[in-house]
Image: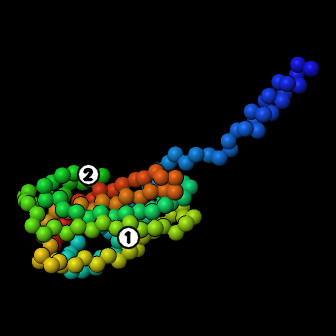
Amino acid sequence: MFYIPVIVFFMLIAACRDDNKVDSEKPYIDISIAGAFPTNCDTIYFGETFLLKMAFSDNVELGAYSIDIHNNFDHHSHSTEVTECNTDPVKNPVNPYVFINDYAIPQGSKEYEINLPISIPEGNDAGLFDNGDYHFFISLTDKEGWSSQKGLSIKMLH
C-alpha cells in the first residue's frame, strides 16, 4: 500500500515535467562569408548603392535585424571588431548622414543571408552629407528575443 502513493507521486512529477527546451543561445552574425560587405574599415560612398551582404544563424529561429549608420566624428566606440581603423581628426558634425531601419526575416528561418541593396544619397535639403568616420551598427534578434550586435567602423566619402 505504501508503494502506490509513492509511485503516483513520481508519475505526477514526471507528467508535469516541461519537455520544451528554452532557447538560451544568441543568434550569430557572420561577416566572414565570401563577399561580405561592409566589414570593419570599409568605405561606403555617398550617391552610390552598395550591397549589404552577411549571414545570420540561430539554433532555433531568427527574428529580425536592424541597421543603424551614424557619425563617429567624436571617436566614440561600440566596435565589436579588434581591427583598428585609421580615423580622421575629431570634428563637429555639420550635416551628418543617419540611417536607421528594421527588417523582417522570413518566419521559420534558422539561417539567412542578406543581399540587400542600400542606396546612400549624396545629401539632403541642408546640402551634402559630411564625409568622415561613421559606425555601421547591425543588431540581430532571434524569435526568443536574444540579440547579437556588430559595430563596424567605416568611412563614408563623396
Instruction: State the residue lying farthest toward the front.
Output: 125
Q: Secondary structure at mark 2?
A: loop
Residue 131 image position (x, y, % from top left): 13, 69
Indicate which disc residue 118 carries.
Answer: none
**Which amino acid, by three-letter code, is at mark 1?**
Lys
Is 83 positioned to the left or the right of 51 in the image?
A: left
What residue would you read off at disc 1? 53
Residue 113 image position (x, y, % from top left): 45, 68
Residue 148 visible to the viewer: yes
Q: CA distance from mark 2 to mark 1?
A: 21 Å
Name the image quarter holding residue 31.
Answer: bottom left
- Residue at the image position 54 percent from the left and 58 percent from the top: 61
Quadrant location of the N terminus in the rendered image: top right
Is 115 positioned to the left or the right of 17 in the image?
A: left
Specify few, some or many for label 2: CA neighbours under 10 Å numbering under 14, 14-19, or 20 or more: some
Residue 34 visible to the viewer: no
**Which amino acid, by three-letter code, is at mark 2?**
His
Is 24 positioned to the left or the right of 8 in the image?
A: left
First-in-chain label (2 vs 1): 1
